[in-house]
Amino acid sequence: MSAVNLVDFQDVAKSYGDGPPVLTGVNLAARPGDLVALIGPSGCGKSTLLRLVAGLNPVTSGRLTIDGRSAGEAVGELAFVFQEATLLPWLTVAQNVEVPLRLRGTSAGEREAARQRVLELVRLADRADAYPRQLSGGQKMRVSLARALVVSPRILLLDEPFGALDEMTREHLNEELLGIREATGWTAFFVTHSVAEAVFLSNRVVVMAANPGRVHAEINIPLAYPRTAETRVSREYVELVTQVSRVLRSVEDAAGPFAP
């Protein structure tokens, strides 16, 4: 990984209108190839942080740059995956995946090649003609991921994409996501409420605190890639999950029993 920051938050704060700050004093960086997991109590601004990177909201103060440019200038190099798959029910899998390319005016030939590439990556090439109602929850999320990857983003923003899935499906998709990352090389911010998921996926876990949202701690995850089912039963993994859990618990205890 490069030593040069791709995404760089410098003392960033965010408020909406005259309301209290949602984020304050955020100093956070991601280098090319990083997978940064964001974890913390509800209301700590994890999703807001992603929206700032995506250029969906401006920072109130401080500085946020992506490869030295403002987030708004780099918007074409990012893709977002949300908790809900948000597939268009009247379109097939292939047509849903092509939506971002159609919006960009990409030619039919280029759309077909890109669509085929990402459907093979997410192992859904044989479901290209299916409609969303014919898919399982895990398959829908893989279509959503393919739709994000079809534009070949440098940065992938994932906001609890597997949160609504059962544990076994979630673990399989975690492994698939890392396999896709190895093949494509994007940098990612991944929001989750699962400590185990955060540790399994990332090379760095950022624990956030609330009221106002801020970075409480950063914990390096030195587990080797690729990570597999065996990783989850290794002593090093279990120790890291325990370490991150303790830090998160300290944040929640400090917030008190009535914290959001």
Image (cartoon, rainbow, N blue to C red):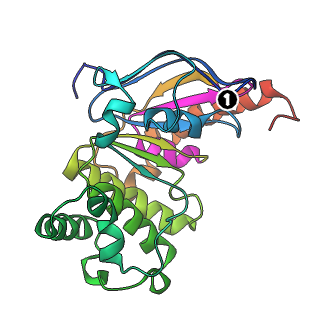
Q: Quick check: 23 left or right of 56?
A: right
Visible residue check, residue 177: yes
Q: Quadrant of residue 189?
A: top left
Q: Residue 33: x and y, percent?
A: 27, 35
The residue lying at 67 percent from left, 32 percent from top is 44
Q: Amino acid at mark 1?
A: Tyr
The residue lying at 30 percent from left, 42 percent from top is 76
The residue to which callout 1 is attached is 16
Q: Residue 130: x and y, percent?
A: 36, 85
Q: Quick check: 110 left or right of 158?
A: left
Looking at the image, how many numbered discs can be counted on the residues? 1
The foreground one among 4 and 16 is 16
The foreground one among 245 and 125 is 125
Q: Residue 88: x and y, percent?
A: 46, 73
**Residue 102 lies in magenta, yes or no?**
no
Q: Quick one: quadrant of the C terminus? A: top right
Q: Which residues are magenta?
A: 194-213
Instruction: Identify whether 205 is placed above or below 226.
Output: above
Residue at the farthest left position: 109
Secondary structure beneath dot 1 equals: loop
Instruction: Identify whether 26 is placed above or below 101.
Output: above
Residue at the farthest front position: 105
Visible residue check, residue 228: no
**Residue 198 lies in magenta, yes or no?**
yes
Q: Quick check: 233 left or right of 21?
A: left
The foreground one among 146 and 99 is 99
